[in-house]
Amino acid sequence: MLDVRHLTYTTVDGTTLLKDISFQVAPKAIVTLMGPSGSGKSTLLRTLNRLNEPAPGTVWLKERDITTIPVVELRRAVGMVFQSAALFDGTVADNVRYGPALLKQRLSDAECVALLAQVGLPAELLERNIGLVSGGQAQRVAFARALANQPSVLLLDEPTSALDPAATLMIEQLVRDLRDRLGLTFVWVTHNVAQARRVSDRTLLLVNGIVADWGDTGHLLDDTHHDLVQRFALGEDVSQLPVQPGGPHANP
Ligand SMILES: Nc1ncnc2c1ncn2[C@@H]1O[C@H](COP(=O)(O)OP(=O)(O)OP(=O)(O)O)[C@@H](O)[C@H]1O
Ligand SMILES: [Mg+2]
């Protein structure tokens, strides 16, 4: 579904934030991106839908170089959900209708209710002001808003880090459901090692913009021989440790 090939990303002021990153995301996979704060997780996620512009030929969506895909089309196919739901003032319905409205399409109430049902929200919420929904509900509305664009891939940037444990588990269940029911593919940035174990098939560990390891989540986190991964999993700050690019599980 997604193929990242030797991606290096340098800002306009010449800082290299991502170095020679390669990994693949299979259809219907849930891949987690982990790493210390400032390691480049959000930067990497944002290059996957051109919020950061990657070099031509380094990020591919279904065998198409994403730099050749018009941005509006790309961002519908590769949607994003952020840490804070980033919803607009107005009603739940206003938010769910947003993506199609950009294409001058108006979703009917029934279509909006169907989208709310996809994320486990009741129809009564449709006309509720966004200021009056809970944090967990708001995050579900953000998923419904992304689903309105009929995406293939959703990029999640710490979508549960502002939620309580119960709401967090509900979002994890929602993502697995969306994968199973709609066949969606997910790239999920998380700080939470336990969450990565619960939700993901494969994990990429990023340290200082370098792939420190990449592979099957269970194998990677349980490999007691990979000191860096073990120290990260125990909550140690590994950002100053030397990184062997690719890591022992790399299988590009
Ligand atoms: N446009 C930019 N120009 C220069 N530096 C940037 C830019 N965007 C991000 N950075 C820097 O790049 C590094 C990586 O940032 P990024 O937001 O990707 O980290 P992160 O892994 O998502 O961290 P966190 O876990 O705190 O969200 C940080 O040092 C950040 O300050
Ligand atoms: Mg981040």
Image (tube, helix red, strand yellow):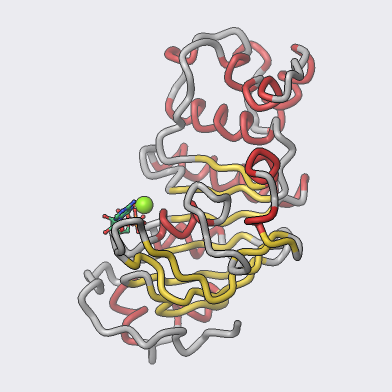
Write down the quadrant of residue 14 in the picture: bottom left
Q: Is residue 137 left or right of residue 146?
A: left
Q: Is residue 247 left or right of residue 25?
A: left
Residue 209 at x, y = what percent?
37, 70
Write down the quadrant of residue 48 in the picture: bottom right
Q: Which quarter shows the N terminus?
A: bottom right
Camera-side residue of 77 and 83: 77
Residue 234 at x, y = what percent?
29, 71
Q: Residue at x 65, y 38 (%)?
A: 72
The correct choice, above or below, for 181 with respect to 121 in the image is below
Q: Which quarter shows the C terminus?
A: bottom right
Q: Residue at x 49, y 26 (%)?
A: 138
Q: Residue at x 46, y 60 (%)?
A: 44
Write down the quadrant of residue 62 in the picture: bottom right
The correct choice, above or below, for 125 with respect to 202 in the image is above
Residue 73 at x, y = what percent?
70, 41
Q: Residue at x 40, y 34 (%)?
A: 84
The correct choice, above or below, for 64 with respect to 144 in the image is below
Camera-side residue of 122 and 207: 207
Residue 174 at x, y = what percent?
62, 42
Camera-side residue of 56 and 155: 56
| Total numbered badges shown on the rendered structure | 0
